[in-house]
């Protein structure tokens, strides 16, 4: 118990605290921006980010991962807020949390094993592009000072780690933010700051229950939004957890993460916050800054609250150029550059899945659509590939009166037509043996193909013997097949 507590909380204290501070600073403008996207007061996004980060630190399944208000979730809230207002958004956030907890108990986190590496790579590359694109408004129609500050920030981020002794002790993004803020204040630069993004809260969040009628009408209004929020939130959280698993070379409990996200969203809704999920950008900032345990996530949430409520006057003076530099660093670090180098080396199908995932996410700004497109495409390519790994050989015996067909491979919906076409029904034979000892039947389409072959041979007056079915194949054939049942032909023809 004590060893587990130390390893998940206190094995990396200094780096976790400093990483949490960097993440908290990067969270402020994003939480405000996401609030504006959703059409709510900036306080809603900031309270949500604080609450979700703190709660997920205790109940989440992936130590070191940052969860807060996100753009993907904010986009889903716009219509609800416009048509029904903030109170209904809070109610939808609570229901979203309940649905995510149910998903956790249904073990839906395990579905991540169906997401191929190509989809994950596409997801990562798309997010890197979206993170970079989100910084462009801060770099258009601005003075040269902004470009100079951004370039200086990138220089500090990438060069500071090479400074002897101190370079490895303090995260370079934190140094970038502090130095550029000090320079901007000292010389009085007239450039955009965090304070220009929106009003920061000056009080602690308070417990509240959404002021909506508890009836079926309310449920019918919020349920579609809650379901969409739950799905997108879990998708982004599971994908981010997988990426952090790879970055830190440690495993995570995806089903616990589902439940944790649900608990965090319920807490957020009860404190006046919007729904959120894991953030890949901030999670990578955390990992790159040295954060590894739950303490980094907790300190990010606590620092965020302390800074916006008690240090708001100082935080408002942070130049956006400093935070843009940090997010550009995140974008560069997030993009999988190996995926470009491996385009010639990897199979065409894998490259297509990766590129389609990127294009759909960037075009729609919806991570769920991109992942869904990638998963479906990967499944189609896989089914097509496996369907080709089936062969049927034929041998003639007993003076040309007995033919033995030997089936090797997988018979399912993709290969069923190929299976049926391999048999010659017009050949004059007394007996046909179909040897399935090297084959496996997966679905009712395969069973229907076997029925079709057997019954066609019998129509031609040929005796048919099916042998060699393994136990799993025999079970599905016995249950759904009709060729060995009375009146098989009539049943197959629907008479």
Image (cartoon, helix red, strand yellow):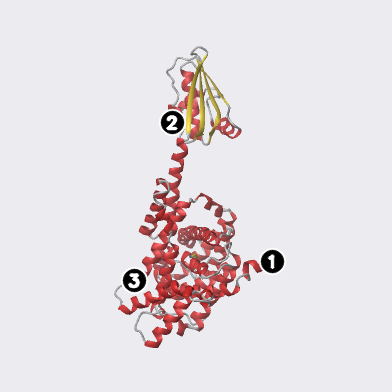
Q: Up-down: is 448 above or below 372? A: above
Q: Secondary structure at mark 1?
A: helix
Q: Which mark is residue 137?
A: 3
Foreground of the two, 248 or 8: 248
Q: Residues within 10 Å of mark 3 (few under 14, many from 20)?
A: few
CB atoms at circles 3 and 1 under 8 Å apart? no
- Depth check, mark 3 against mark 1: the one in front is 1
Q: Which mark is residue 418?
A: 2
Name the residue at 42% across, 49% down: 345
CB atoms at circles 2 and 3 under 8 Å apart? no
Q: Which mark is residue 410?
A: none
Foreground of the two, 451 or 410: 410
Mark nearer the N terminus (3 vs 1): 1
Residue 457 is left or right of residue 17, and the answer is: left
Give the residue at the far right of this rendering: 1
Q: Up-down: is 382 above or below 186? A: above
Give the residue at the far front of this rendering: 164
């Amino acid at each position: 118990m004590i060893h587990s507590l130390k390893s998940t909380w206190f094995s990396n204290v200094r780096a976790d605290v400093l990483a949490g501070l960097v993440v908290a600073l990067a969270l402020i403008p994003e939480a405000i921006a996401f609030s504006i996207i959703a059409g709510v007061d900036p306080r809603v996004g900031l309270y949500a980010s604080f609450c979700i980060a703190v709660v997920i630190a205790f109940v989440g399944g992936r130590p070191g991962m940052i969860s807060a208000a996100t753009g993907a979730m904010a986009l889903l809230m716009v219509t609800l807020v416009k048509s029904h207002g903030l109170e209904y958004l809070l109610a939808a956030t609570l229901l979203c949390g309940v649905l995510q907890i149910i998903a956790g108990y249904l073990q839906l986190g395990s579905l991540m094993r169906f997401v191929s590496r190509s989809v994950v790579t596409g997801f990562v590359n798309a997010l890197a592009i979206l993170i970079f694109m989100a910084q462009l408004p801060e770099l258009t129609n601005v003075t040269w000072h902004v470009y100079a500050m951004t370039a200086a920030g990138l220089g500090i981020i990438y060069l500071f780690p090479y400074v002897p002794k101190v370079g490895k002790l303090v995260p370079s993004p934190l140094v970038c933010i502090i130095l550029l803020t000090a320079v901007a204040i000292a010389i009085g630069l007239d450039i955009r700051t965090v304070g220009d993004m929106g009003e920061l809260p000056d009080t602690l969040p308070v417990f509240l229950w959404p002021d909506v009628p508890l009836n079926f009408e309310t449920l019918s209004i919020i349920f579609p939004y809650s379901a969409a929020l739950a799905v997108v939130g879990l998708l982004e959280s599971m994908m981010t957890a997988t990426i952090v698993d790879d970055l830190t070379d440690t495993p995570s409990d995806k089903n616990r993460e589902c439940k944790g996200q649900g608990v965090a969203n319920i807490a957020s809704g009860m404190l006046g916050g919007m729904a959120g999920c894991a953030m890949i950008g901030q999670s990578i900032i955390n990992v790159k800054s040295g954060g590894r345990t739950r303490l980094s996530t907790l300190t990010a949430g606590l620092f965020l609250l302390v800074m916006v409520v008690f240090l708001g006057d100082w935080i408002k003076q942070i130049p956006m150029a400093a935070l843009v530099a940090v997010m550009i660093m995140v974008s560069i670090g997030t993009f999988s550059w190996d995926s470009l180098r491996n385009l010639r080396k990897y199979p065409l199908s894998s490259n297509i899945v990766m590129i389609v995932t990127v294009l759909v996410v960037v075009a729609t700004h919806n991570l769920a659509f991109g992942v869904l497109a990638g998963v479906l495409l990967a499944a189609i390519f896989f089914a097509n590939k496996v369907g080709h790994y089936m062969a049927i050989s034929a041998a003639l015996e007993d003076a040309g009166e007995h033919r033995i067909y030997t089936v090797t491979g997988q018979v399912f919906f993709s290969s069923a037509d190929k299976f049926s076409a391999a048999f010659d029904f017009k050949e004059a034979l007394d007996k046909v043996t179909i040897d399935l000892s090297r084959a496996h039947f997966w679905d009712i389409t395969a069973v229907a193909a076997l029925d079709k072959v057997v019954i066609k041979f019998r129509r031609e007056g040929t005796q048919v013997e099916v042998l060699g079915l393994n136990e799993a194949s025999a079970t599905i054939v016995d249950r759904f097949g009709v060729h060995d049942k009375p009146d098989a032909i009539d049943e197959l023809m629907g008479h």
